[in-house]
């Protein structure tokens, strides 16, 4: 009799917990859908990051060019008086010759 009770018990548990099995199945299905969406979003983000990396490299190169130009301008400004003297030399020579 105990053997028969054990055999019928799993079927009874299945019927009693049918709603739980269905909810569990729905939850697993929702997790699969969300996992797929996360995977797609990750791929899209990876693609966009590659473009961002290229843009950042271009920005870095442009910034280095601006820094180099600024350095040259500061150096020229530091030698401003010498440049003015050099530029005035032809006028001084012309004045001396006359």
Image (tube, helix red, strand yellow):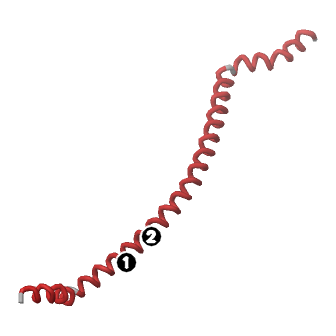
In this rendered view, identify the residue nearer to me: 33 or 66: 33
Q: Secondary structure at mark 1?
A: helix
In this rendered view, identify the residue nearer to me: 94 or 32: 32
Name the quadrant containing residue 48. bottom right
**Can you identify the residue that label 1 sits on?**
29
Q: Secondary structure at mark 2?
A: helix
Q: Tell whether 22 sits left or right of 76.
A: left
Rounded to the nearest angstrom, the CA distance separating label 2 from label 1 is 11 Å
Query: Residue 20: horizontal and vertical position, in percent?
Result: 23, 83
Query: Residue 80: horizontal and vertical position, in percent?
Result: 69, 21
Q: Residue at x 34, y 75 (%)?
A: 28
Q: Tell whether 17 sits left or right of 97.
A: left
| Depicted 66 relative to depicted 7: above or below | above
**Can you identify the residue that label 2 sits on?**
36
Quadrant of the snapshot with the N terminus: bottom left
Q: Tell whether 74 sits left or right of 37.
A: right
Name the quadrant containing residue 67. top right
Q: Residue at x 26, y 83 (%)?
A: 21
Q: Residues within 10 Å of mark 1 (few under 14, many from 20)?
A: few
Query: Residue 40: horizontal and vertical position, in percent?
Result: 49, 67
Q: Residue at x 51, y 60 (%)?
A: 45
| Depicted 83 relative to depicted 98: above or below | below
Query: Residue 46: horizontal and vertical position, in percent?
Result: 52, 57
Quadrant of the snapshot with the C terminus: top right
Q: Residue at x 10, y 88 (%)?
A: 5
In this rendered view, identify the residue nearer to me: 92 or 35: 35
| Depicted 2 relative to depicted 58: above or below | below
């Amino acid at each position: 009799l105990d053997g028969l009770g054990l055999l019928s018990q799993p079927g009874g548990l299945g019927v009693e917990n049918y709603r739980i099995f269905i909810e569990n199945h729905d939850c697993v299905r929702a997790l699969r859908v969300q996992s797929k969406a996360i995977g797609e979003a990750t791929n899209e983000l990876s693609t966009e990051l590659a473009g961002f990396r290229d843009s950042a490299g271009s920005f870095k190169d442009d910034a280095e060019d601006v820094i180099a130009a600024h350095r040259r301008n500061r150096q020229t400004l530091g030698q401003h008086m010498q440049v003015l003297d050099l530029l005035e030399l032809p006028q001084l020579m012309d004045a001396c010759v006359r």
